[in-house]
Image (spheres, grey):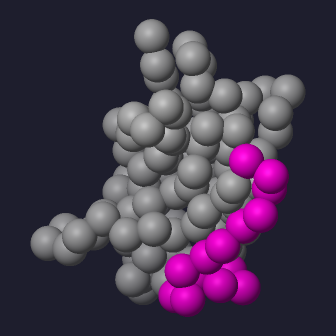
Amino acid sequence: QVQLVESGGGLVQAGGSLRLSCAASGIISTSNIRGWYRQAPGKQRELVAGITSSGRTNYADSVKGRFTISRDNAKNTVYLQMDSLKPEDTAVYYCNAVRMSTDYWGQGTQVTVSS
């Protein structure tokens, strides 16, 4: 059984910070986790931050310098540190993993940034 469980979302004022966690279990390890995506109402899901199995990271232009993706292999968890949050960061954030060409998604965690 595969599980990706996101947590850490919530309501925060503009300029604040949140740290999202994606805990993997089952056949998924942190090396399978590819990154964080988000989907705002009426918009397509978009990549926010990616991480390769070797640890290389990449970010959407809109979050560069504000968000940081990292992982803790011992805890089988990938994190997304979000600083200097803006109202336009409001969305449901999802963790994505790929294993043997199959995509896996968590249930998502809501992030709401008030102005």
| Image location (x, y in percent) of residue 48 | 51, 69
What residue lies at 65% left-to-right and 84% top-to-bottom? 64
What residue lies at 85% left-to-right and 27% top-to-bottom? 74
| Image location (x, y in percent) of residue 11 | 45, 60
| Image location (x, y in percent) of residue 95 | 49, 46
97 is within the stretch colored magenta:
no
Vertical placement of residue 115 versus 102, above or below: below
Residue furthest to the right in view is 74
The answer to whether residue 20 is visible is yes
What residue lies at 52% left-to-right and 57% top-to-bottom? 36
59 is within the stretch colored magenta:
yes
Determine which quarter of the picture holds residue 29: top right
Q: Quadrant of the C terminus?
A: bottom left
| Image location (x, y in percent) of residue 100 | 49, 31
- The span shown in magenta is 53-66
The answer to whether residue 106 is visible is no
Q: Magenta residues: mostly which secondary structure?
A: loop
